[in-house]
Amino acid sequence: MTEEMVVSVSHVLLRIKTTLEQQLNLHDVWISGEVSNLTKHRSGHYYFSLKDERGAMSCVMFASYVKHLRFDLEEGMKVLVKASANVYPQKGSLQLYVTSMRPDGLGALFLEFEQRKKRLEAQGYFDPAHKKPKPDVIEHIAIITAKEGAAIQDVISTVRKRWPMLKMTLYPALVQGQRAAETIVARLKQADSKGYDAILVVRGGGSFEDLFCFNDEELVKTIYNCQTYIVSGVGHEVDTTLCDLVADHRSVTPTAAAQWVTPDQKEVMARLEQIQATLNFQMHQHIQGARKQFSTYQSNRYLSDPNTWIIDKRLRLDNLEQVLFQTKDRITRYDSDILHYQQRMQLSIAALFKKESQAYTNTFQQLMQVGKVYTQNQIHRFHHTKERQQDAIQHYMENQQKHLIKNVSLLDAFSPLKVIERGYSITMDEGHVIHSIHQVTKGNIIQTQVKDGTIFSVVTNSQEESHANKETKIS
């Protein structure tokens, strides 16, 4: 009988794991399926199942790969993944380790577009407050588009028709395909550093997939951070890209973008002709006014005969001189009157002052006499009050002395020392007076206060009052 081999579960799983790694190569395969049971771990890992109508597989996508996703993974989304299949030994389960993922189909592109648009809008990249105003003068522009495309031809022809003196510099870039967004970003940064008045990012019409490079997130951020005024003209009027939304101005076509940055030379000429006509009219009006004013000057008698002006001024001067002399005489008379009134006022003030001084002197003397009498009366009242107070104090002290002598006699009469002098004594135990035999016990030391000192005794026995005929021993 052949000896059977015994292996552990982990050994079997290890052999299966090794076989899968060696035999099953999925690196060049895109696996399609629908996402279910999606769990986003706090570490950044994604755990989910990938299923179709006939089967399902557990999947894990680690955070280092998740950060490269260009869309938000959601439950029920159809995706294409690249992954390696392997066994998870701790649970013995077969699962896919996903390294790359993209939405499945054109519908997924729309989903990616909407998710990206929503995210960038929340971050403020489309805020109108950030958009730069159109420059007042545009003399030199940069154009970012395909070198051989129809868009550059539309822009050049439009500029030449409308404003041929505008300078244009082409920055050729890919406008379709995987590397298109990368080249557009590079050309944008290059043009932005040159100091152009405006930069046009343009492309002709195409499918949603063809224009998808203009929805690139890095392109949006680059346009947002540009210092130059950016005009976007991508696709047709019905096409809207994220490039259109972030640009300072969105034109519906490349031709419209060229029209936006150029004035129409015909309109400018018409405007210049209108301005010229207005200037000619204003100049004619000004000349007519000047002629009228010159005619007025010619009819002025002073200009025709300047001596007339001198004569008029001399007459005016003589009149003013006469008025001046008359005014001087009146001022002299006023000065004399003022001096007279001033002397009279000084005499009146002196008399009034003398009269008032005498009245003030009389009043002061009266007040001094009244004050003297009042002061003498107050002094007399003070001496009288002082004598009355001294008599009252003397009487009060005599009464208090009598009360004190009386109280001392009473205290002396009731003093315990008086009682002791008559032969009585006071017995105490530790400072407390003994009134009853129940207050002491055998062995207590008691003190007896007599007339000339204190006797200390030890209690050996005590008896009730009914046995008073018996002898109490005290030592």
Image (cartoon, rainbow, N blue to C red):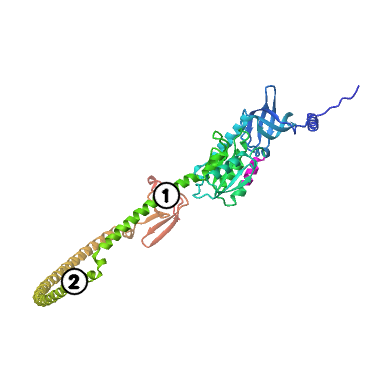
Q: Residue at 55% of width from left, 33% of height from top?
A: 238
The residue to which callout 1 is attached is 275
Q: Tell me the SS state at disc 1.
A: helix
The stretch drawn in magenta includes residue 456: no
Q: Amino acid at mark 2?
A: Leu
Q: Amino acid at mark 1?
A: Ile
The answer to whether residue 142 is seen in the rendering is yes
Q: Position of residue 389 (x, y in %)?
A: 18, 67
Q: Residue at 20% of width from left, 72% of height from top?
A: 314
Q: Earlier in the sequence, mark 1 or mark 2?
A: 1
Magenta region, mostly helix, strand or loop? helix
Q: Quadrant of residue 394?
A: bottom left
Circle 1 Cα neighbour tier, 10 Å, few/some/many (<14 / 14–19 / ≥20)? few
Circle 2 Cα neighbour tier, 10 Å, few/some/many (<14 / 14–19 / ≥20)? few
Disc 1 + disc 2, Cβ < 8 Å:
no
Position of 280 relative to 204 (above/below): below
- Numbered mark located on residue 150 in the image: none
- Assign the C terminus to one quadrant of the image: bottom left
Highlighted range, magenta: 179-187
- In screen coordinates, is 438 left or right of 304? right
- Numbered mark located on residue 315 in the image: 2
Position of 91 relative to 201 (above/below): above
Q: Position of residue 153 (x, y in %)?
A: 60, 41
* Along the viewing direction, whichever of 465 and 361 lies nearer the viewer: 361
- Assign the N terminus to one quadrant of the image: top right
Q: Quadrant of residue 43?
A: top right
Q: Position of residue 47 (x, y in %)?
A: 66, 32
Q: Position of residue 303 (x, y in %)?
A: 26, 66
